[in-house]
Image (cartoon, helix red, strand yellow):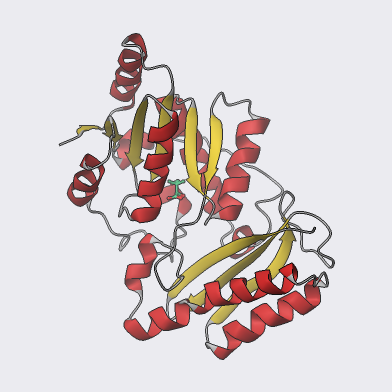
Amino acid sequence: MITQISSISEIRAHVARLRENGKRKIGFVPTMGALHQGHLSLVEASNKECDATLVSVFVNPMQFAPDEDFKKYPRELDKDSALLTQLRVDAIFCPTDEEMYPVGYQSTVDVTEITKLWEGAQRPTHFRGVTTVVLKLLLAVQPDFAYFGRKDFQQLRVIEQMVADLNVPTTIRPCPIVREADGLAMSSRNRYLSPEQRIQGVSLSRSLNATKELSNQGERDCQKLRTTMHKILEDAKVGIDYATIVDRRTLTELTTLDRPAVAIIAARVGSTRLIDNCELDAN
Ligand code: PAF
């Protein structure tokens, strides 16, 4: 079994020993566990580039609103650890809530602008929780590279912004979305879907594919692209939170596809909220 470390001082000491033993590039994959192929692809990306890879498993209470699924979020450290054993992972950092947020804890990290949009508008306290925990994890592990999936596109942008703004000495590596055979983007929350809901959920990737195809054919009018996106989602009877085209850097909504963009969707299938996206090119 892979070494499991739950204290911040021990993970720091462990990484320092790795460096003393000649591991020059340390890679880090932060997760909330319930690992799937998407997470494993991040580990593989780290293994390719780094001399040692560490994975954190921590279901971060700060990024869940009181009415969200913190309590029911899957926790399966033994299964996660067994999965990671098949890959070359040096250690799992699995702190307790008390280790990360001891009694009296009172500091947070806020990226103020791009967090107001989309996921941030729907979940006003979410990104504060994400940036706070990610900075704490980066300070604990002090990796050279940290790997994040593009599926949570806004999360990735927010983390890139934080790392740039605060001069965090870790390079963020965005990694491709991993999909199920039917196109559904992999997510630990997919397990909440019934077979019927699962079919509805596939409409997100179908909507994105159709949008990409239209844009590849030369369509530059984002209103027309949006209409296509919405039609497919409405036909599948999912509850649309948003489905639109945004600037890839600022995340502001576009009227014309005249710069690097991303089509983003958040939709509800029953009580499960799914998100997905696909990058669109202007040329
Ligand atoms: O994407 C996730 O799983 C989480 O938001 C992260 C980055 C591990 C922070 O808790």
Q: Which image quarter holds the C terminus?
A: bottom right
Outermost residue to the left: 1
Q: Is residue 162 left or right of residue 103?
A: right
Q: Is residue 234 above or below residue 179?
A: below
Image coordinates for residue 165, horizontal then vertical, percent? 67, 32
Q: Residue 100 occupies which quadrant of the picture? A: top left
Q: Is residue 184 above or below residue 162?
A: below
Give the mark count.
Answer: 0
Q: Which image quarter holds the N terminus?
A: top left
Give the camera-side residue of 82 and 31: 82
Q: Residue at x 44, y 63 (%)?
A: 179
Image coordinates for residue 236, horizontal then vertical, percent? 52, 87
Q: Residue at x 67, y 72 (%)?
A: 213
Outermost residue to the top: 20
Q: Is residue 80 visible?
A: yes
Outermost residue to the front: 217
Q: Is residue 73 left or right of residue 229?
A: left
Image coordinates for residue 136, horizontal then vertical, percent? 46, 32
Image coordinates for residue 171, horizontal then vertical, percent? 56, 30
Q: Residue at x 72, y 76 (%)?
A: 226
Q: Is residue 214 left or right of residue 180?
A: right
Q: Residue 187 occupies which quadrant of the picture? A: bottom left
Q: Is residue 104 visible?
A: no
